[in-house]
Image: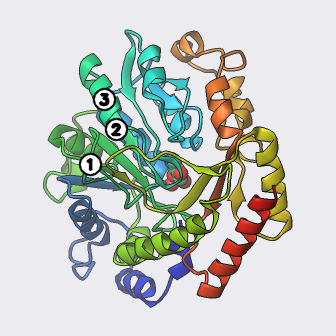
Amino acid sequence: MPGFEIFGAEERKQVNDVLETGVLMRYGFDGMRNNHWKAKEFETAFAKRMDIDYCQLVSSGTAALTVALASAGIGAGDEVIMPTFTFVASFESILALGAVPILVDIDDTLTLDPKAVEAAITEKTKCVMPVHMCGSMADLKALKAICDKHNLILLEDACQALGGTYDGKPLGSYGDLGCFSFDYVKTITCGEGGAVITNNEKYALNADHYQDHGHDHVGNDRGAESHPFLGYNFRISELNAAVGLAQLGKLDGILKMQKENYSILREAIETIEGVTFRRVPEGGEENYSFLNFFLPTEELTKKAHKALSEAGVEACFYWYTNNWHYINGWEHLRNLKSLGNISSEVKNQMQDLNNTDFSKSDAVMGRTISSLIKIGWTEKQVSERATKMKHILSSI
Ligand SMILES: *Cc1c(COP(=O)(O)O)cnc(C)c1O
């Protein structure tokens, strides 16, 4: 996920447009800004690229999830179903609203297992939040059927899968709402930033107001605007939006390079006995930001991961124990360690995460290795990496 690998003249030009006027805010100051509206321009361009009606830029991917949930009316005591393998932003955004994260197992897609989702639904469930981890997607058709049946909101966290598609639609545009992150290590970056996309006019309007203190953005005098409901500040700055605008122009080139490098690595290891790949649901295409593969047992996977890093094959992740993307690493969540008091809804409704059976997730994560795909690798570097991976995995 390499937007930072190609920061260059285009980004500097966009940022300089903003620096020349000094209007660092996305709203107002019409006379001073020399007609530069970087955040607005990004929103229009991104909505077009995502083939969707509305885009709301915000200050981070975590903010995007929070704003999306709030815009759909989710609040205290509402339950949101999320996977055991994800980035911490999933439960952070839910908890920030006083809502309750309900963690369920993943399957060999490395995302929500639809059967586990259905089993976790209660009267309080309001939303299902699949997270398209490491470049590929959840089984969205199955999840949508469950959401339709139980009248739930489907919110896609597509922060790690920008550019992937499902059923001919860009990931993030299939559910009721989709979220993206443009932090420094994502497919494209704003430095810090995020976006909410939707075809729902009401959610879009709610997001527009909520991320800017509830301002209704009617007229051009902020002091005279009205505030139909409470909001917060999750605004992006013009400088960050300007970087993203330049990066967005590079997205298709990034995706093409990722696919090329991914394909070379995959071809090198796919005939090795015992190596299998993460399942991509039918009708889906990855964004190729990671090559995710399984070995037959946890023991062999640990051995392979150690051998790969010792051989200098950088950026291969063993999430099961070596990282903070899996429930094993979330001691603070499992024990609800918080600076202040936690609301009674959350206390009463949270699962006892230290004693919940996630053996199905363990069985998948224990055997998963993910190789990051960089676009800055030279042809020689990719082919050397492929040879090393092939050699190490064959010998194991
Ligand atoms: C990066 C990421 C986020 C949060 O993004 P920030 O912009 O860093 O707040 C949320 N979900 C997933 C899956 C991510 O990878």
Secondary structure under the numbered disc 2 in the rendered image:
helix
Measure the alpha-carbon separation of dots 1 and 3.
19 Å
Q: Which residue is mark 1?
A: 167
> Which circle, 3 or 2, is nearer the viewer?
2
The x, y position of residue 242, in whole percent, is 38, 74
Q: Quadrant of residue 5?
A: bottom right
Q: Residue 161, image x and y in percent? A: 44, 55
Q: Earlier in the sequence, mark 1 or mark 3?
A: 3
- In the picture of the structure, the residue carrying the numbered disc 2 is 140
Q: Residue at x 29, y 44 (%)?
A: 207
Hey, what amino acid is under mark 3? Ile
Number of other residues with Cα within 10 Å of mark 1, as a class: few under 14, some 14 to 19, many 20 or more: some
Residue 151 lies, in percent from the top left, at: 26, 20
**Badge 2: few (under 14), some or many (20 or more) residues near its Cα, within 10 Å?**
many
**Mark closest to the chain's N terminus, 1 or 2:** 2
Q: List the residue tagged with mark 3.
A: 153
SS for callout 1: loop
In the rendered image of this protein, does residue 156 appear above or below residue 386? above
Badge 2 amino acid: Leu
Q: Quadrant of residue 147?
A: top left
Query: Between 269 and 364, which is closer to the camera in this rendering?
Result: 269
Instruction: Estimate how packed mark 3 is, as few (under 14), some (14 to 19) or many (20 or more) residues with alpha carbons within 10 Å.
Output: many
Q: Is residue 280 left or right of residue 361?
A: left
Please provide percent x and percent y for residue 384: 70, 79
Between 173 and 300, the residue placed more toward the observer is 300
Mark toward the start of the polypeptide (3 vs 2): 2
